[in-house]
Structure formats: structure tokens, C-alpha cells
Image (cartoon, helix red, strand yellow):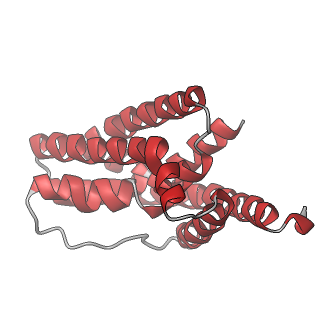
Amino acid sequence: MALINTAVGLLAISSPIGVLPVVAKAAGNDPSRVRRISRLAVLTFLLTLLAACWWGQALLDLFAITLDSFRVAGGLILLPIGLRLIDGKEVSNSELDLDEGLLGVVPIGLPLLAGPGAISLVVSEAPAQWQGRLALSAVIAVLALGIYLVLLVSMPLRRALGELQEKVISRLMGLLLSAIAVQMLVGGLKGSFPVLG
């Protein structure tokens, strides 16, 4: 169940539907540029979250940060993002005057797809056992593939969805993300202050 929650949370945070306008604008209606930007963005997303899955806890240990504290911080990062999505506001605004290689990595790959919220979710929910981490890595890889396919069809998909459907999907993702953020906050606070449990 935790793995499903993490997968839904990552999908909501990365919000590939919300990134479609950025990819379309960056590509300038050129299908070859869409493919290159999408490939770089998804590769950045995949490598960043795999690194967070396997080495995030070691980094926390290096700085003597407890997992419960990190969950609270992650919840505090995710909650405003979810509320902004519910309000229909942009999560990030970036100038898109760079070359496609840079655009695929920054800002589309990082931080739009794999931002602080996604990284903190993966680090806080990564299981201690290697089998669990392997399962989470597989979930991240499947999500990366799905996001890649969505970005590849960004221009026709935007036309098919229309503005209203884009907004509805974005708000639904915001609601799911807000619920996951509150769950992370409650879990982290209960772990940090056992009297609350």
C-alpha cells in the first residue's frame, strides 16, 4: 500500500500534464525537439530519483537528520505545491530561452519533474531493505517511461485535452498531493513526538 501511495504521490508531484505547456513552448512545435527535450527530461527525472532512493538515507545519516524530521520537512514542501495546484496556479515559471539540451535537464527535468517534493517523498518513503528499494526503483522506472510517453505526445495531447481538462487534472493531482503531504506530516510528527500517537 505504501508503494502505491508513493507512486501516486510521485505522479501528482511530477504532474506530466502540467509540464506539457512548458515542453510545447520549449520545442516550438518541432517534433524532433520534443523528442530530445523529453528524453533528457525523463533521464534527469529517473537518475535523480534513483539516487534519492538508494543514497538519500545515507545523506540524511551524514547530516544526522532523522527520517521523521525529513518526513515533516517533505510534507511542508509538498503541501503548498498541492494547494497551488488546487488553486490552479503555476508551480514554477521559467524563462525558456535556453538550448534544448539545457531545457531538458533544467528546468523541465529538474525541478519541474523531479523537484524537492519528489526527492523528499522518495527519500522518506524508501524502504530500508534492498528488496523494497528495488521495488521502488521499478516504480520510478515505470513512471519515467509513462512520463516520457506523455511528453512525446505533448502537442497533440494538449490539443485533445483542451484547457478545461488540463485544469481539472491539475486540480485533482493537487488534491491527491495535499492528502499525501498531510499524511507525511502526521507520520513524521507522530514519530518525532510519540505522545501524539
For the C terminus, the image quarter is: bottom right
* Residue 28 visible from this viewpoint: no
Evaluate whether residue 196 shows in this view: yes
Q: Is residue 167 left or right of residue 72?
A: left
> Where does the image place residue 15, in percent across and percent down from the top left?
45, 53
Residue at 78% across, 60% down: 191
Residue placed at 15% from the left, 53% from the top?
27
Front residue of 55/73: it is 55
Q: Quadrant of the N terminus?
A: top right
- Vertical placement of 172 versus 40: above or below? below
Q: Number of marks in the image? A: 0
User: Is 26 displayed left or right of 62 in the figure?
Assistant: left
Residue 98 drawn at (x, y percent): 10, 65
Q: Is residue 101 left or right of residue 162?
A: left
Seen in the picture, residue 74 relative to 29 is either above or below; the reply is: below
Front residue of this view, candidates 71 and 13: 71
Above or below — where is 90 with respect to 143? below
Identify the residue at image location x=76%, y=66%.
Answer: 192
Q: Position of residue 173 (x, y in %)?
A: 57, 55
Which residue, as the protein is rendered here, is positioned at the far top? 131
Residue sitting nearer the eye, 145 or 128: 128
Q: In the image, is residue 135 above or below residue 41?
A: above
The residue located at (11%, 54%) in the rendering is 100
Q: Nearer the viewer, residue 191 or 155?
A: 191
Locate residue 179: give its quadrant. bottom right
Q: Is residue 30 left or right of residue 74?
A: left
